[in-house]
Image: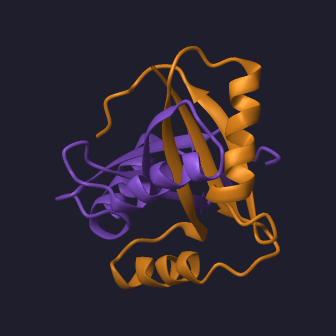
Chain colours: A purple, B orange
């Protein structure tokens, strides 16, 4: 079993109200030094078998048709080497 | 200006209805070979100046207090080396 990660982010020219809300909240919470925030989505797909170029192309098609809205979002597909322990 | 990425994912023991909805939709769209999907959030923070350990610790505090719900979500903080062009 391998993990493929799809990151979906709003395109740079698209307004991102969620990111702006986070950016506005940071100073109210006493945080400084952040000039911009953009919020997107992260999908972790557990793929059966080995991750070949064909599998990555198939995941890119999933990202295009289901995981993202290509009009307003960009996506990246990548293999995550190890199931890392998260903080 | 440096980019720090915060990934927020539902904890493994927490149900993820969004991920399950994606998993259920894949075969209906003709996709196969995916055993599980989990959906989380990705934040891209543009940080002023250099990213020191103090800056990363500050971003981890932001992730803990604002970007994630530590009861049900894990997060990771990392520096994104270059502002990569996304597909």
Query: In this orientation, which residue lies closer to the viewer: A6 or A73?
Result: A73
Residue at the spot x=78%, y=68% of the render?
Answer: B12
Residue A70: percent from the left, percent from the top?
22, 58
- Residue A58 visible? The answer is yes
- The residue depicted at 52 percent of the width and 20 percent of the height is B81
Q: What is the residue that sits farthest to the top in this orientation?
A: B50
Up the image or down, B37 lies above or below B51; here it is: below
Please name the residue shown 72% across and 56% down the image: B65
Q: Using residue B86 as the reference point, say whether residue B6 is left or right of it.
A: right
**Is residue A82 in view?**
no
Q: Is residue A55 above or below residue B49?
A: below
Residue A41 falls left or right of residue A15: right
Q: Quadrant of the N terminus of chain B?
A: top left
**Spot occupied by residue A13 in the image (x, y as percentages of width and height):** 19, 45
- Residue B59 in picture, x, y percent from top left: 67, 38
- To which quarter of the image does residue A33 belong? top right
For residue B84, above or below residue A82 = above
Q: Residue at x 59, y 84 (%)?
A: B17
| Count of numbered circles on the image | 0
- Residues A6 and B45: in front is B45
Residue A31: image location, x then y, percent: 63, 41
Q: Which quadrant would the C terminus of chain B be assigned to in this image? A: top left
């Amino acid at each position: 079993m391998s993990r493929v990660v799809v990151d979906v982010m709003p395109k740079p020219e698209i307004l991102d109200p969620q990111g702006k809300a986070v950016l506005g909240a940071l100073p109210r919470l006493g945080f400084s030094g952040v000039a911009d925030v953009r919020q997107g989505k992260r999908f972790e797909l557990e793929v059966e078998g080995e991750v070949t170029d064909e599998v990555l192309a198939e995941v890119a098609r999933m990202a295009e048709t289901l995981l993202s809205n290509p009009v307003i979002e960009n996506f990246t597909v990548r293999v995550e080497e190890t199931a890392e322990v998260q903080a």
